[in-house]
Image: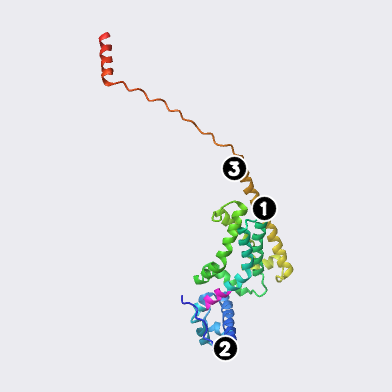
Amino acid sequence: MSATRRPRRSPDGGYARGDETRRRIIEAAIALFGQHGFDGASTRDIAARAGVNAPALQYYFENKEGVYRACAETFAEEAWRALEPSVTRGREALKRNADTAALIDAFIGIQEAVADRIFMKRHTTDQHLFFAREQAGSEPAIATQILMKQVRMPLNEVCAQLLERITGLAADNPQTLVRMFSLHGQLVMFHVAQSTTLTMLGWDDMDENKTEFIKANMRAQSRVLLEHWSRERDARKRARANRPPAVKRVVVKAAPAKRVPAKRAKAAKVAKRTAA
């Protein structure tokens, strides 16, 4: 897939106009990629929705793959701006060897930042569909690669390291990773299936009070599990400390039998036969 070509702007005030046009094309593309998928969205339709002519799309992005890459890069940049402060606090807690309570707070702080990002008002159904299609693996791999490198990997690495300290299990232990994904999964339905969750809850939309209600439940559930796992860690440490030392088995080797010289053995046999 070709790299995205940056717009060629004129020096006479064209920067702002170019940025605005580029932004409109990306927003239109996100909507149509969400609704119809990469294969179903045409460059002509994207240009029409953005209110530009088709050559303008090629001017800024070269082709449809370039537009798709730009959509993923935009998502990644916006997401990291929102999440980086909480991830940085998590790294700092690890660096200073913070106590368990502070580590738990740091983990939950990252979850809250993710929740705030998910519940942003300007996120549309089309944007949620864009992510759902990307996660389903039915779209070009470049979006997943960009989001993994710029957002998901750095965030999940810190979360796994926090869990390692909290639970006493290695960050790459499958149980640690399953626990991390399970905790993150509390928000998945609200991200990719908002219509279902709103209908089941009897809500028309997701206002500030409702999102805070969801976040409060997430915080409480995460804290209960994290504190429980930290107690399991401490119990394992106590069990190891109280384990009696292993008793060393002393093996006494028998002295080797003395070998009788061959001549003496033969003489003894002759004497025995003579006596008989």
* Mark in the foreground, 1 or 2: 2
What is the distance, in whole Å, between disc 1 and disc 3 at their CAs? 20 Å
Quadrant containing the C terminus in the rendered view:
top left
Give residue 82's position: percent from left, percent from top.
63, 70
Magenta portion: prevailing SS class = helix
Residue range corresponding to the magenta coloring: 67-74
Residue drawn where x is 72% and y is 66% of the image = 212
Instruction: Decide which of tag 1 and tag 2 comes sooner along the chain.
Output: 2
Mark 3, secondary structure of its residue:
helix
Q: Which mark is residue 156?
A: none
Instruction: Decide which of tag 3 and tag 2 comes sooner along the chain.
Output: 2
Q: Quadrant of residue 264?
A: top left
Front residue of this view, candidates 7 and 253: 253
Residue position for label 2: 14
Mark 1, secondary structure of its residue:
helix
- Asked whether the beta carbons under mark 3 and mark 2 sit within 8 Å of each other, the answer is no
Q: In which quarter of the image is residue 134?
A: bottom right
Asked whether, in this view, residue 107 is left or right of residue 274, the answer is right
What is the distance, in whole Å, between disc 1 and disc 2 at their CAs? 56 Å
Give residue 21's position: percent from left, percent from top.
58, 85
Amino acid identity at mark 1? Glu
Residue drawn where x is 56% and y is 37% of the image = 245
Number of other residues with Cα within 10 Å of mark 3, as a class: few under 14, some 14 to 19, many 20 or more: few
Q: Residue furthest right?
A: 209
Amino acid identity at mark 2? Gly
Q: Which mark is residue 240?
A: 3
Asked whether, in this view, residue 126 is left or right of residue 200, the answer is left
Mark 2, secondary structure of its residue:
helix
Instruction: Decide which of tag 1 and tag 3 comes sooner along the chain.
Output: 1
